[in-house]
Amino acid sequence: MVNIRMATVTDLIEMQQCNLWCLPENYQMKYYFYHQLTWPQLLWVAEDFDGRIVGYVLAKMEENEDTSAPDYVPHGHITSLAVLRTHRKRGIATMLMRRAQLEMEQVMGAKYVSLHVRKSNRAAFHLYSETLAYEINDIERGYYADGEDAYDMRCTFARHREREAAKNAAAAAVTEVTGGVGKLVTA
């Protein structure tokens, strides 16, 4: 069992350690501090029963655009997501992502969230596309330091809510038609 909670400044060293264990893309501590100081609502950690950080999400609001432009749309970006191998396949990454997305939308007013994922990272691609309803926006050639391409993916919050409502309605219809047996099918 893990606890998902907002990260504090005292978690940053363990977040960086988790990043070093899990990912080839690593960040200096000042980058974690910058995120913590600028967007504290968008940093979340998963801690196990003894308080050890076993996963994190590092997210931000995009700030490279002219916010006064008439076509400006506020949006977030997932900088990094990692879960220790010993704690994978338990839904931790999904919980971390959903929490960061909720804060982006409800607190920061984001309309969508973007992220980059290695083309070779099939597990992460499945999480983003199938579980979290991200769609490929573009392919960025040579995005990573080793030259690998990245999928530029996006999740539009309004569209995501519509999909979830449709899935819930379909599950409710199955349950109604089958008199409850549908719960076994949709679980």
Image (tube, rainbow, N blue to C red):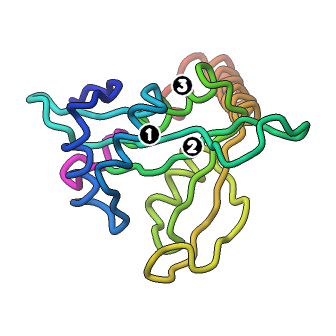
Figure disc tally: 3
Instruction: Write down the quadrant of residue 155 in the picture.
Output: top right
Q: What residue type is labelled 1?
A: Thr
Residue bearing the label numbered 1? 94
Sequence-first disc among 2 and 3: 3
Q: Do the residues labelled 1 and 3 touch (CB within 8 Å)?
A: no
- Check if residue 64 falls in the magenta segment: no
Q: Which residue lies furthest to the right in this view?
A: 70
Disc 1, SS: helix
Q: What whole-number distance in Å separates the C-alpha atoms at marks 1 and 3?
A: 14 Å
Q: Residue furthest left?
A: 50
Q: Which of 149 and 32 is in front in this view?
A: 32
At 35% across and 25% down in the image, what residue appears? 6
- Residue 1 shown left or right of residue 131 in the figure: left
Q: Residues within 10 Å of mark 1 (few under 14, many from 20)?
A: some
At 60% across and 53% down in the image, what residue appears? 129
| Highlighted magenta segment, given as a residue range | 83-92
Residue bearing the label numbered 3? 103
Q: What residue type is labelled 3?
A: Glu
Q: Nearer the viewer, residue 61 or 38?
A: 38
Residue 132 picture location, percent across and down:
57, 43
Q: What whole-number distance in Å separates the C-alpha atoms at marks 2 and 3?
A: 15 Å
Q: Are marks 2 and 3 in contact (CB under 8 Å)?
A: no
- Residue 14 shown left or right of residue 77 in the figure: left
Q: Residue furthest bottom?
A: 147
Q: Which amino acid does label 2 sit on?
A: Leu
Residue bearing the label numbered 2? 132
Sequence-first disc among 1 and 2: 1
Q: Nearer the viewer, mark 1 or mark 3?
A: 3
Residue 81 picture location, percent across and down:
40, 49
Residue 168 picture location, percent across and down:
65, 25
Disc 3, SS: helix
